[in-house]
Image (cartoon, rainbow, N blue to C red):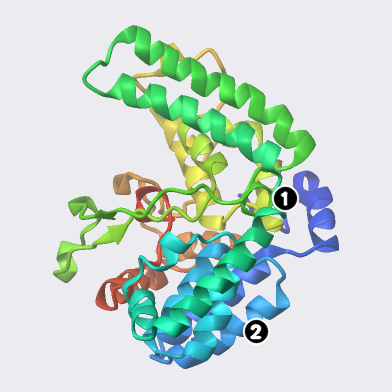
Amino acid sequence: MIKLLLSIVLLAPILCRAQQETNYIDYHKRIIVAEQQFLYYNNPKAAVEQYRKIFTDWKRPFARDCYTALQIASLLKDTTDATFFFGQCFRNGVEWNTVVFSPPVNRLLQDDMSYKKRIGDLYEKYYNEYKKTIDTNYRNIIANMYKHEYALRRLAEGPTRSEPLIRKWLAVEDSNMYELVPMIKSKGFPGEKRIGLSHILPEQVDDSRTGDRRNTYDFRMVSVNLNCHAATLFFHHRCGYMLLKEELMQAVLEGELHPREYALIYEWSHNYFAVKHWDDDYHDFRCEGNRQDEWYNIFIEPFLYSKDIAAVNKARAEIGMCSLDHDEKKKKFAIDNELYLYFGTFRKI
């Protein structure tokens, strides 16, 4: 079982290093408490106050949390708090096109054009400062890996699909992982703090698969990916978790990898090895699977979820994830208030 305190042999050196800096699992637990204020107690003002404290205590909060806090403050039409959270967004890599995509945020800006100009000036200042904090060379390496793989994937899965194209695409997936393993071991995980966010223009989508018919609403979401390309490379390759278990947990502890991304990488890798896949014979990069001991119920296929809700919530809590009930309340709150509270693959992370 993956337990942070009990995996002493593998994780003790990692935990020591993380504690010398900051353990981001504590950060995520505080974020969950802030979200509870508007999800459980109908008190968004208290949530805003909690976010302010967290972002003051933690030098590098996650961009998605800054964006969430900004949206809550915008719902309240509180320009003082909104200004603070605009600054936090820009300092942590959220682009202008992303912040204005949120209806409550956009309404707040459109109501006062002088205020919009002031926030625009903040963006120019803080976003330029943010760009100086990231490792541009490392970022470019990861971006090129992703770009090459994504281009081949589109060709291999499109009308031009052929066995040679499939082989070429999966060979690139393998070569990317060959390069990533030693790179991450020497340089650290190329995550949000180290190389910055991947930038994909927001695009409104209406995906019926994300709907919750039992609760009679459609789950309209937006493809705002406030994460980094490195996590996506791990979602695509079956061996990522198996080869870098310690490094991925270290990335969670130091705030480079969000717990939800870690959970998806973990479940993706284990579920891949649970059955035979069509692409097994195409991969040259070999690795061994191992037993799945944790369930986070975040994988793309719900039929593989655990029915032991208490165990799932316990596993989630250990890495700083919210409960399943919290997630459901968050989805409904997002829909009811035109907010975007999920920021990545499958509208789950």
Q: Nearer the viewer, residue 320 or 154?
A: 154
- Above or below 184: residue 329: below
Q: Nearer the viewer, residue 308 or 159?
A: 159
Q: Secondary structure at mark 1?
A: loop
The residue depicted at 43 percent of the width and 37 percent of the height is: 271
Q: Please give the residue where the numbered disc 1 appears in the rendered image.
A: 7
- Above or below 158: residue 123: below
Residue 20 visible? The answer is: yes
Amino acid type at image mark 1: Ser
Q: Left or right: where does residue 286 sit relative to residue 333?
A: right
What quarter of the picture does the C terminus occupy? bottom left
Q: Left or right: where does residue 252 sit relative to residue 283?
A: right
Residue 39 visible? The answer is: no
Amino acid type at image mark 2: Lys
Which label sits on residue 93?
A: none
Q: Left or right: where does residue 345 sit relative to residue 229?
A: left
